Amino acid sequence: GENVEQHPSTLSVQEGDSAVIKCTYSDSASNYFPWYKQELGKRPQLIIDIRSNVGEKKDQRIAVTLNKTAKHFSLHITETQPEDSAVYFCAAMGNFNKFYFGSGTKLNVKP
Amino acid sequence: DSGVTQTPKHLITATGQRVTLRCSPRSGDLSVYWYQQSLDQGLQFLIQYYNGEERAKGNILERFSAQQFPDLHSELNLSSLELGDSALYFCASSTSGGKETQYFGPGTRLLVL
């Protein structure tokens, strides 16, 4: 089955700096890669997603890049703000609609 | 508020017992997903239903079962509960169950003593 690895597990940045979270996957059949943000005590919320026929997608301060050859995808947050502090999960949808999640990255944005 | 509702919010029970968690998807969504989130294992995909039919199966134990009813609400049944089943159980819904946004409910926190 699919295996999704996510790094780093924790990330601390200064407000205004950029943050990058990386995920790798093992199944070349995976074709959909969402990113979720989960604030403390709250539900996960989709922040951006990318399909395998696209290399990059951007939404304001958030961007995701996908390298199908290397089987990795990354989340980029620019001009970080304290409200970006949360746990971020990457996921990959593999064969038969199964979802596999990374282990999460706790992002702390220091004011 | 995502429009997905889950009941109960909290559940405390004993080992060996059986519980049922309930989820109502957003209006118009045909697909329901169940996830387990524990401290040491992150988010685990359990199972997906689409319009009453099972569509995808993840790491769901044989002691667990689920179904989606004609009105599209879903129930997750957990039986012969063990201490390790203590976790936050999320339900999510989406329109057609494909490569699209999933909207998560608030979760049910299960504590097995």
Image (cartoon, coloured by chain):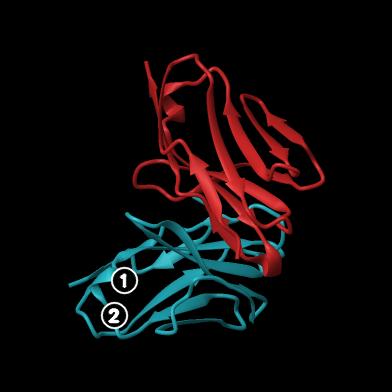
Chain colours: A red, B cyan
* A28 to B16, vertically: above or below: above
* B100 to B110, vertically: above or below: above
**Which residue matches tag 1?**
B85
Tag 1 and tag 2 share a subunit: yes
Q: In the rendered image, is residue A4 in sight?
A: yes
Percent across and percent down for residue B104 are 51, 56
**Which residue matches tag 2?**
B81
The quadrant of the rendering that contains the C terminus of chain B is: bottom left
Q: In the rendered image, is residue B97 in sight?
A: no
**Residue under the point 55% across and 28% down:** A20
Pick the front one: A76 or B48: A76
Q: Specify the amino acid type for callout 2.
A: Leu
Percent across and percent down for residue A3 are 56, 57
Q: Specify the amino acid type for callout 1.
A: Asp
Q: Chain of mark 1?
A: B
Left or right relative to A66: residue B64: left
**Residue under the point 47% across and 75% down:** B60
Distance in Å between CA atoms under marks 1 and 2: 6 Å
**Residue under the point 43% across and 66% down:** B6
Badge 2 element: loop
Which of the 4 quarters of the picture holds residue B49? bottom right
Q: Are marks 1 and 2 in contact (CB under 8 Å)?
A: yes
Circle 2 crowding by C-alpha within 10 Å: few under 14, some 14–19, many from 20: many
